[in-house]
Image (cartoon, grey):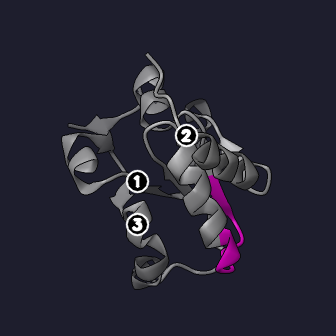
């Protein structure tokens, strides 16, 4: 059963989605092979329960504060994911607002990664 989200949250997500780039889980391996960095923006306990094998964790709540600790170039291709693509869309918009030029949100998120059968670390 899909989660029921509040209308104001959905409005923020839809606004972000209109302004960012998105990909699907089927495109993720190609993006990684081209040098993309994958960031899991879910909560720490979600990440610890399982994540994309090459992902690093920076939670959505601290991504603006902690992204520069990674020393990524402003042009680094960055793919963000969460559970389904809502939180990652908001986080992608935020990084874009900070000046990162090639940020992509994975629509379908963790559930898409699992459905696609991509490599995970559980």
What segment is highlighted magenta in the picture?
96-104
Task: Name the front one of labels 3 and 1.
Answer: 3
Residue 2, placed above or below residue 33: above
Q: Does the magenta-highlighted stretch encompass residue 102?
A: yes
Q: Nearer the viewer, residue 11 or 55?
A: 11
Tag 3's secondary structure? helix
Q: Does the magenta-highlighted stretch encompass residue 94?
A: no
C-beta proximity under 8 Å, tags 1 and 2: no
Residue 66, placed above or below residue 44: below
Dot 1 corresponds to which residue? 40
Residue 118, placed above or below residue 66: above
The numbered mark, 3 or 1, whose residue comes first in the sequence reads 1
Dot 2 corresponds to which residue? 6
Numbered tag placed on residue 61 in the rendering: 3
Task: Name the front one of labels 2 and 3.
Answer: 2
Coordinates of residue 80 in the picture (x, y in percent)? 52, 54
The numbered mark, 1 or 2, whose residue comes first in the sequence reads 2
**Is residue 33 shown to the viewer in this render?**
no
């Amino acid at each position: 059963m899909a989660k029921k989200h509040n209308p104001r949250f959905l409005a923020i997500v839809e606004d972000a989605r209109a302004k960012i780039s998105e990909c699907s889980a089927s495109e993720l391996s190609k993006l990684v092979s081209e040098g993309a960095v994958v960031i899991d923006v879910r909560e720490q306990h979600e990440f610890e329960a399982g994540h994309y094998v090459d992902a690093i964790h920076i939670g959505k709540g601290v991504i603006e504060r902690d992204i520069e600790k990674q020393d990524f170039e402003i042009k680094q291709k960055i793919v963000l994911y969460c559970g389904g693509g809502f939180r990652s869309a908001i986080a992608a918009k935020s990084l874009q607002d900070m000046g990162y030029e090639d940020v992509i949100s994975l629509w379908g998120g963790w559930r898409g990664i699992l459905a696609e059968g991509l490599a995970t670390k559980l």
